[in-house]
Image (cartoon, rainbow, N blue to C red):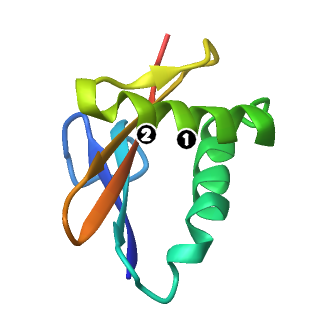
């Protein structure tokens, strides 16, 4: 499957006031929805910054994969960091919104 996991800075139980620290798109390899991951990432990133273009999102995804071995995230200067972690049976994209 494909799962969205949201991590708040501090969980208070009040979803209207909790501030998101980061989100993880958790993907099981070879799942039936794996082919939708790029589309899900685009929705997730654009929900946090609608000014980021599809081309910029694709570049962030590629750059995140390329920097995974260094354990770093990437950004394009528009308030979103993207990270990538891969294991034997799953991988994860981390989307971090940088608050001002």
Callout 1 crowding tier (Cα within 10 Å): few <14, some 14–19, many ≥20: many
Q: Is 78 left, or right, of 34 in this rendering?
A: right
Residue 53 picture location, percent across and down: 80, 35
The residue beneath circle 1 is 61
Image height check: is 81 above or below 14?
above
Q: Is 3 left, or right, of 38 in this rendering?
A: left
Q: Is 50 left, or right, of 21 in this rendering?
A: right
Q: If the image is split into quadrants, where does the N terminus sit?
A: bottom left
Q: Residue at x 33, y 54 (%)?
A: 92
Q: Is 10 left, or right, of 48 in this rendering?
A: left
Image height check: is 77 above or below 71?
above
Residue nearer the viewer, 69 or 73: 69
Task: Report if the CB atoms under discs 1 and 2 are less than 8 Å apart.
Answer: yes
The residue beneath circle 2 is 65
Callout 2 crowding tier (Cα within 10 Å): few <14, some 14–19, many ≥20: some
Describe the element under mark 1 as helix, strand or loop.
helix
Residue nearer the viewer, 68 or 5: 68
- Which quarter of the picture shows residue 90? bottom left
């Amino acid at each position: 499957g494909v799962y969205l996991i949201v991590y708040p800075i501090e969980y208070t139980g009040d979803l209207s006031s909790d501030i998101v620290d980061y989100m993880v798109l958790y993907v099981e390899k070879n799942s039936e929805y794996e082919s939708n991951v790029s589309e899900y990432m685009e929705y997730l990133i654009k929900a946090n910054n609608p000014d980021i273009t599809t081309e910029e999102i694709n570049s962030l995804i590629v750059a995140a994969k390329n920097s995974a071995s260094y354990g770093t995230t990437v950004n394009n200067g528009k308030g979103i960091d993207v990270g990538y972690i891969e294991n034997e049976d799953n991988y994860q994209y981390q989307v971090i919104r940088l608050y001002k």
